[in-house]
Image (tube, rainbow, N blue to C red):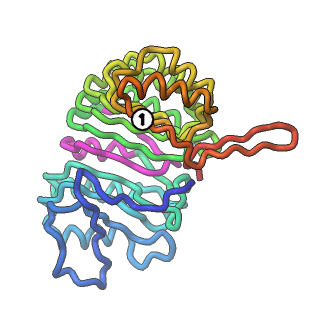
Amino acid sequence: MTIGDHLDSLYRLPAYTFPGPDAAKDDLPEADGCAWRVTSDVYDAGEEWEAAFARFCEDVDTTRVRALIVGAWSEAYDSASTSVVDALVAAKDRFPALRALFIGDMVMEECEISWIHQTDLSPLLTAFPRLEEFGARGGTDLVLPAVNHSSLRRLTLETGGLPAEVVRGVSASDLPALEHLDLWLGTPDYGGDSEVADLEGILSGARLPRLRELALRNSEMQDAVAAAVAAAPVVARLEVLDLSMGVLTDDGASALLAGQPLTHLKKLDLHHHYLTEPVVERIRQTLEAAGVEVDLDRADADEDEEDDGTVWRYVSVGE
């Protein structure tokens, strides 16, 4: 599966794409009434993203903007988001009300997720210390070292392969307000070279005292992640656990069921899985009977078997 839809909201605000240079600007929404999406074209851009952002800063009262979505930039398949980050950091004083920021809202027709070239995004968290939501799409060249951020409540990194250094950076970050963490770990084929040990700081929960929703998904090592989660201290205070979109088999699910109780959860999301019906039924009987909402939709998780018996299983979002 690839990503076919842009974000439709951010910070509980509907997304609105800032018009191109030739469009009328007399009917723009209120500055604080939407999540503004500023975008260019990946191929043969008539206007660079930086120029579109400059127009946006002139035409919209940026002091009232609460949510900003960075869409495509020129040649995102080959050019990092460095100039985008630089432009946002340079304009930080113009956005005192900014509380949510997403970098790289591109769909497959613009740039496949693993083709998107990112950069070091930590300057954005430094520049906007009052951000409550931060997200990015694309793992190639992505850098996010350990940070301290006292306001961030939601962190989302969507990739076909999340670099191990980024996983370790998140694990070592001090995020005392974080309530929701969503990491798409991906596959080594697209740069996802992390190991379960890299998640230790997250699973211990030591730096995440307010975490209530944890998603470690879209992973080729989903069985190993599930086994680690089964004994992770952070799970006891979670309300939502999401291990979906990956290569979860009976081994991982059985380890999860054999670990600490999960009956305190409000929801367990395992959609896009490779479980047999007996294990699916065990999960239902164990958790649904306790009032846990369980998503066991197999979705598009289809196996390919070669003539020699080799079975291939895939994450939901790779390329």
Front-lying residue, 302 or 206: 302
Q: Which residue is at 37% across, 23% downward?
A: 290
Q: Position of residue 265 (x, y in %)?
A: 35, 26
Q: Secondary structure at mark 1?
A: strand
Q: Which residue is at 78% across, 43% downward?
A: 305
From the viewer's perspective, tell me whether residue 260 is left or right of residue 131. right
Q: Is residue 285 above or below residue 9?
A: above
Total marks shown come to 1
Q: Is residue 238 above or below residue 166?
A: above
Q: Position of residue 70 (x, y in %)?
A: 34, 59
From the viewer's perspective, tell me whether residue 75 is left or right of residue 318. left
Q: Is residue 104 above or below residue 180?
A: below
Front-lying residue, 188 or 296: 296
Q: Position of residue 53 (x, y in %)?
A: 29, 67
Q: Position of residue 59 (x, y in %)?
A: 18, 73
Front-lying residue, 116 or 159: 159
Provide the residue span drawn in magenta.
121-147
From the viewer's perspective, tell me whether residue 21 is left or right of residue 256. left
Q: Is residue 53 visible?
A: yes
Q: Is residue 214 visible?
A: no
Q: Which residue is at 57% across, 54% downward?
A: 1
Which of the 4 image quadrants contains residue 289? Answer: top left
The amino acid type of the residue labelled 1 equals Ala
From the viewer's perspective, tell me whether residue 145 is left or right of residue 252. left
Q: Is residue 140 magenta?
A: yes
Q: Which residue is at 49% across, 15% downward?
A: 259
Q: Is residue 158 magenta?
A: no
Which of the 4 image quadrants contains residue 48? Answer: bottom left
Q: Is residue 180 above or below residue 230?
A: below
Q: Residues within 10 Å of mark 1 (few under 14, many from 20)?
A: some
Front-lying residue, 45 or 28: 28
* Residue under pointer 1: 215
